[in-house]
Image (tube, rainbow, N blue to C red):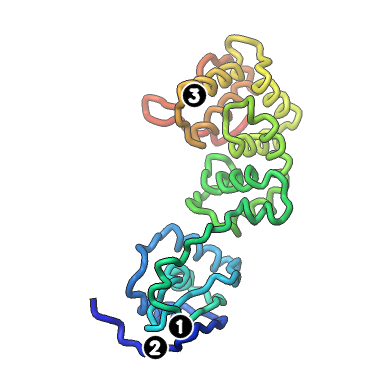
Amino acid sequence: MTALKIAPIDERPSAEIYKVTPAVAKRWLSRNVRNRTISQTTVDAYARDMAAGAWQVTGEAVKFDTNGALADGQHRLTAVVQSGATVPMLVVRGLAPDAQRVMDSGKKRTASDALTLGGVKNAAIIAAAARLALREPGAGFTSERISAPTNSEIADFIEEHPEIHHAAEMAGHYYPAFDAPPSVLTLCWMRFAAIDLFACAQFFIAVADMQTEGAGDPRLALIRRLANARRNRERLDAPAYLSLIFRAWNASRRGKSLNKLLTESHGGTVAIPSRLA
C-alpha cells in the first residue's frame, strides 16, 4: 500500500469542533488508509440519528494522526455522507500513529447506563424492552424493524410510552415465576393492559401462580410450554416468546380450549398474532 504523503499537522494534539458537511466527510474519508471493516448496521444507526436531528457532540472525536491519516471516525463520517446532514463533531489532530491500536478500548455506554444515570428504576428491563419493541414489529409498537436501535431512538420510545415504567415493574415482579424474559413480559403487559388492565393482571397472576382451570386452559398450556423450554434448556428467541404469550392471551380471552402451544408449524416458525383479543 502506498504511504499517505501528507505533511505532519503538529506534534502536539489539538482539538476543535467542526460542522461536518457531507463534502467534508467525503474528503476526510479519503484519508482512511487503515481501519476496521465498515459495519453498515452501525452506519445506518448513526445516519438515522443525524437525519432526525438527534446527533450531539459527546466528546467522542474524529481523530487524525500526525501523518494526516484518519485514525477513528469512519462510521460517523460515512453516516454523514449517507444521511446528507451537517452535524457538529469534535475533531482531534496530531495523535501518534500507534495510538489507533488502543482506541475504542473503553466500555461503550448503553441505553441502560444512560437511564440508570438519570435515576430511572428498572433501567435494564426498560432499555431491553424498548430495544425489543423497536427491533420486532410483531410486538405491535412499530411497523418497521430497526435492527440496531440507537440510544436516542430508545430514549424517544420510552418518552412516547411512559407506561413502560409500570410495565417493567410488573415484569420484574412476575419474572421469577414466568419463565420468560423480563423485556418480553414488559411488552406483553403494555399490550394487554392497553386492552383491559384487570384482565391483564388476572392473566399474569394465573400464569405466575399456576391458578388455572386445568386441561384446556390456554394459560396452563403456556405454563407447560415455558416450563418445558426451561427444563430442556431450549433457546427460544424473543419472537417465539411473544408468539406463545400472545396466542395464550388470545385463546384465553376468546374462551377457546387449548392443550398445547407450539413454536413451530409445518411451514416453519409460528407467527406472532398481529391482533390481540
Residue 233 in picture, x, y percent from top left: 46, 26
Q: Residues within 10 Å of mark 3 (few under 14, many from 20)?
A: some
Whether residues under marks 2 and 1 lie with C-beta atoms below 8 angstroms apart, the answer is: yes
Q: Secondary structure at mark 2?
A: loop
Residue for badge 2: 8
| Rendered image quadrant of residue 152 | bottom right
Residue holding disc 3: 229
Image point 53% across, 54% down: which residue?
Answer: 149
Closest to the observer, 272 or 132: 132
Q: Position of residue 211 (x, y in %)?
A: 68, 15
Q: Earlier in the sequence, mark 1 or mark 3?
A: 1
Residue toward you, 23 or 56: 56
Q: Amino acid at mark 3?
A: Ala
Disc 1 crowd, CA 10 A, few/some/many (<14, 14-19, 20+): many
Name the residue type under label 2. Answer: Pro
Identify the residue at horizontal 38%, vertical 73% (top origin): 98
Q: CA distance from mark 1 to mark 3?
A: 55 Å
Q: Position of residue 46 (x, y in %)?
A: 50, 64
